[in-house]
Amino acid sequence: MAKEFLSQNKIHFEEKNISTDSQARLELQRRNISGVPAFIIGEDAVIGLDKEKILKLVDHRVIQCEKCSKKMRVPINRGTIEVTCPKCAHVFKVQT
C-alpha cells in the first residue's frame, strides 16, 4: 500500500529492506524507530502510512490539467503559480 500511495502521488522514493540492508537497519535503530513502514523525509521520520503527514513533508503536489486531465507535479508553498500542461499546452493558475 505504501509503494502504491507514493507512486500515485509521484513521490520519488528509495526502498530499503531492513532484513537484508544492515545500514538501513542501523539508521532506524539510531532514530529509535521500531515500526515499518518507516519514511525518512529530510530529517523527519514518519512511522506507518500516515498519508497526510507524508504529503505535508514532501515539496510538491500532483495536480491534473483542467483541460486534458494530465497529472503533473507542482511545487508547494509558492502562492499562485502559472502552470503549462506538458501534454496539451493549456495554461492555468493554481494555488500551491
Image (spheres, rainbow, N blue to C red):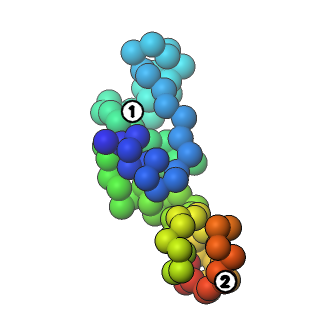
Q: Is residue 30 visible?
A: no
Residue 91 - label: 2
Q: Residue at x 46, y 47 (%)?
A: 7
**What kind of element bears circle 2?**
strand
Where's residue 96, x and y in %?
55, 78
Q: Nearer the viewer, residue 38 or 82?
A: 82
Position of residue 73 in the picture relative to residue 48 (left or right): right
Where's residue 37, x and y in %?
35, 36
Q: Earlier in the sequence, mark 2 or mark 1?
A: 1
Q: Nearer the viewer, residue 81 or 48?
A: 81
Could you give the CA–CA distance between mark 2 and mark 1, rounded to whole angstroms?
47 Å
Q: Residue at x 54, y 67 (%)?
A: 70
Q: Is residue 35 visible?
A: yes
Write down the quadrant of residue 76 in the picture. Answer: bottom right
Q: Residue at x 32, y 47 (%)?
A: 49
Q: Quick check: 26 above or below 57?
A: above
Residue 32 - label: 1
Q: Quick check: 24 above or below 84?
A: above
**What kind of element bears circle 1?**
loop
The three-letter code of the residue at mark 2 reads Val
Where's residue 44, x and y in %?
49, 49
The three-letter code of the residue at mark 1 reads Asn
Q: Residues within 10 Å of mark 1 (few under 14, many from 20)?
A: few
Q: Residue at x 46, y 56 (%)?
A: 9
Query: What quarter of the picture does the N terminus occupy?
Result: top left
Residue 50 - label: none
Write down the quadrant of residue 75 in the picture. Answer: bottom right
Q: Residues within 10 Å of mark 2 (few under 14, many from 20)?
A: few
